[in-house]
Structure formats: structure tokens, C-alpha cells
Amino acid sequence: MNKNMKPSGTLMETFPAMFLLVLVASFNMVGAQRGAGQPGMPATGPAPAAAGGCLFDVTKYGAVGDEKTDMSAALVKAWADACASTTPATIVVPTGTFLCGRTDLKGPCKAPEITFQVQGTISAPADISGDTWFLFDNVNNLNINGGGTFDGKGPAVWQTKKSVAVTLRFNYVSNAFVQGITSKDSKNFHFIIIGGKNLTFSQITITAAGDSPNTDGIHMGRASQISILDSNIGTGDDCISVGDGISDLTVTNVTCGPGHGIAIGSLGMYKNESPVKGIHVKNCTLTNTLNGLRIKSWPDREVCDASDIHFDDIIMNNVSFPIIVDQDYCPWNTCKNTGPSKVSLSDISFTNIVGTSGTPEIVHLNCSSLHPCQNVQLSNIDVKSTSGPATSVCCNVKPTISGSIPPGC
């Protein structure tokens, strides 16, 4: 018996108090299980704040879901209060359509964990100043969930190029879990990750027209331990693009298309680029994309290296150029120098790649004459061409071949 409970003369007098204690204890246990807990754990529906935490509803700060009233000031105030909390904090954007201009959500925060729960739609204005719509800067232990949508309203500016705002930019964010949200019609890139460590994107939907300019799905640089899982990405540019300084990237169960495929690079354009290593792309499907799996570097520019890159169990449906290593990458014929690329590529494998292509050249490995590609493996490449016999081209590389691949290498 609880020593704070007064003795009673009968069981009927004692039982209600004991029942109340059990009920309270059970409630606290369930609350702890439903809380945000550790970063990286998926949310289960629109649960309120973590156990013992605080809830910050943007409508309590003046936000109105009428798609007319700019909620950016209300959101910044809600973020400031959540960031200052000493317990886990949840910011809620409820159902409705909320207009929101440029918004910077900055740390470091006192809150041990912040959840940004978007249940409705956040709509961008026609013009956004600067290169970013939503900035998450220097935040640790961040969750973004709720099943809502970020609508970038890109069609209004894609042709005029009046705005180049990225929808979500993660600058030096660590221990983040982004789940179950949609990014639609970004004005520029949908997501950019710069710096940071341990970010997971799961069950994400990214959509833009196949001819929309520069609408890359997820671009990253100078970060580590990134996972992109169980997501659908269709854009007018790369579904996923990997810049310099990325290590330990896992891409699994992602569908890509339309778009330009999954790309490593371009590398070697700028001085002091950091190495790329530990890239694993597995169980992905690409449909109606220009490129499939691509590694690209600039000719005769700067030094960099990329290694430990693996593509496994990939399905391609009507992909124009399925497998590409291009170390003479020069878009729009802007290259002034014509020497070989100074980027070193090694320990690369393409395994169990199947499907169809609209062009005959299934494998195109054009490596640098200065730094020929090292330890490249091609295994079971079974992509059929719908426009003639399938072929492969290999330059400045001697790949190890196993199973069947198109002839030529």
C-alpha cells in the first residue's frame, strides 16, 4: 500500500484510491510511449506533444488557414517558444491551407527535441525573397511529420525565374527524422541538406512536372549518415543528387520518375571539395527518367575523389541512359578547359540492374585519362533496349564483369 494513502477500515474504501493510482500510472506509461521519444522513431498519427512536453499550435499565435493570411510571423513566434522549452516541444500546423512567406527556424534550442507537425497545407507566395523558403538552421533532434504538404507554387515562376527559393533547407541539422510529408511544385530544389549528421527521410512524396527547371528532389553536400527510405520522387531534374563531402548515404525503396535519375556529382568544379564515400542505393525503381544511375565530374577543373559507391537491385522502366559515368561533364558547353578530369573514382559497383531503355547504349563508362576508374564491377546488367541491340561503352576503365551485360566493355 502506498504510504501516503490513509488506512481504511473496509476494502470498498481502499479500492477506489488504489484504482486511481493504477490508472494514473498506466496513463503516464502510455503517454511516454506515444511521445516523440528518440529522433528517428516514426510518429503514429497526429499525436500531441511528447510526454511531459509542450504543444504549440500556430493558430494560437494568430495563424489563419485561409490561404490569404501570411503565417510566417506566427510560426516564428511559435518556434521561439518551442525552442526555449526545457521539455520536448511540438509545433502544430493544423488542417487548412496556410500561406507562409520566407521563414527561418534557427537553433540551437534548449528543447531536447522539436517536432514540426504539418497536418494541413503550407502554401508559398508567388515571390519569395532569397534562395530559401523554409530554413532549419543548427537544430539538433528535429522531427517533421504530420502527413501535410508544402506547396511551393512553382508553376508561377518556373518560366520567369523570378524566384529560386528552395522549399526546405537543412543547414547543420543533426539527428533529424522527416516522415510522411509531401513537397509539391517547388520553385527550385525541394530539399537541400548542407552539413549535419544522421538525417532520415522516410515515406516522403516529392512531385513536380517533368519539364520543371531545377526542381531536384533531395540534394546534399558536406553531411554524413543520411537515409532516404520508402519514398516517391518525381521532378524535372535529379530525383536525388549527391554533392561533395557526403559519406554514409543509404537510398532504399525509392521510386524515381519523371526526372534525371539518381546522380553522384557533379564533382571537381570547385576548390577544396571533400571526398564522397559510402554510397549505397538499393531496391529502387526508375521510370521514364532521362538518366538512371549517374556519376559525373567536370573536365580539367579541381581535385576530388569518390569511392565505395554501390547500386544494387535496380529496376528501370524506359530510362534513356541507364548507367553513366561521365568525367567530361560539361552542361550547356560552358567548359573553357578541355583537359581530363582530376577527380578519382574507385570501388564502384552496378549489380542486378534490369528493365528497359529507349536507347541502345545501356552502359556508358567514360572515365578520366588522368585518373582511370579503379575497381569497377558490372554484374548482371539486364536492361533491354527498345530501339536496337543493347551495347556498352567503356573508356579509361577495365571493369570486372560477371553475369550478363550488353557487349562492348
Image (cartoon, helix red, strand yellow):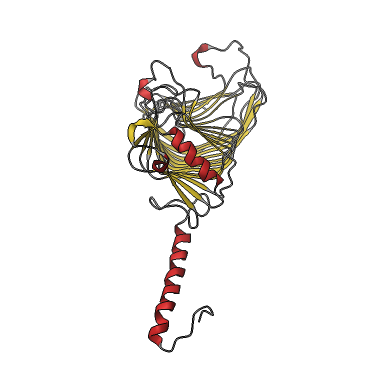
Q: Position of residue 319 (x, y in %)?
A: 39, 29
**Residue at position x 59%, y 10% in the image:** 336
Res. 356 visible in picture: no
Q: Report the residue at 63% width, 14% height from top.
A: 339
In the rendered view, would you say 29 is above or below 91? below
Which of 379/1 is in front?
1
With 31 as the anchor, is 268 left or right in this view?
right
Q: Is residue 97 above or below residue 164?
A: below
Residue shown at the point (39%, 20%) measured from the top left: 157
Q: Residue furthest top?
A: 336
Residue 389 rendering spot, x and y as whole percentages: 39, 25
Q: Which picture quadrant has residue 249? A: top right
Q: Nearer the viewer, residue 197 or 243?
A: 197
Q: Is residue 185 visible?
A: yes
State the residue lying farthest toward the bottom. Answer: 9
User: Picture quarter containing residue 334?
Assistant: top right
